[in-house]
Image (cartoon, rainbow, N blue to C red):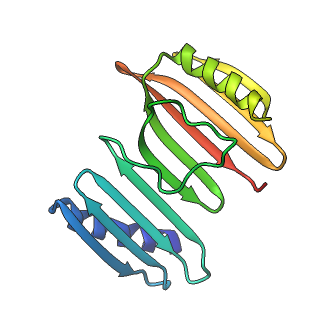
Amino acid sequence: MKTLSLILSAAVLLATAACSKNVKESATAPDGSKVTLEKKGDQTTMEIKSKSGDKISLNVSEKGMKLATELPKDVPLFPKAVVQMDNSVSGTRMLGTNIPATVDEGVKFYTEEMKKQGWTIDASMAMGEGFMITTKKGERNCTIMITKNGKDTYLQLTLSGKD
């Protein structure tokens, strides 16, 4: 029920924001969680803060945007990647980007760079037109998925765990 009320609150805010180029709206869900939506041009940011202090944030932009917060120094971002999604939920961060490279070039970059940064490659697997790499360093995990997306190459990076 808590999730449903958050979704409904977010949906109302999204519907309001869809009609405007720039807007900032907030609502309080029945469980006391606060939902804030901000839209600036192509970029939309949604943040949900629970009464207990948990925070969920989602930033999206089709044209590209800056990262909400920098990545850890040992997690490389593909050069000239266009960040389209930056999502944080309970200690897990997920980035969605388009990269100016082929799937094979993305796999080569992340395999080499993650090793240089001290990450261990746990697994790598071809998946149709895409590829997945799972890595580990200390208590952290990083999964990189790279796939064709029409004429583009989409890269999703998911980072979880603590240092």
**Residue visible at 37% across and 61% down in the picture:** 45
**Residue visible at 79% across and 39% down in the picture:** 136
Where is residue 19? Give x, y as percent. Answer: 15, 62
| Side (left or right) of 59 relative to 41 | right
**Residue visible at 28% across and 70% down in the picture:** 12
**Residue visible at 35% across and 80% down in the picture:** 27
Where is residue 7? Give x, y as percent. Answer: 41, 66
Where is residue 134? Give x, y as percent. Answer: 72, 32
Q: Residue furthest right?
A: 138
Where is residue 47? Give x, y as percent. Answer: 44, 68
| Side (left or right) of 123 relative to 16 | right
Judge whether 82 appears above or below 9 on screen: above
Decide if residue 8 is in sight here.
Answer: yes
Q: Quadrant of the C terminus?
A: bottom right
Residue 16 picture quarter: bottom left
Q: How many marks?
A: 0
Residue 128 picture quarter: top right
Judge whether 99 appears above or below 69 on screen: above
| Side (left or right) of 29 relative to 20 | right
Decide if residue 1 is in sight here.
Answer: no
Judge whether 124 appears above or below 49 on screen: above
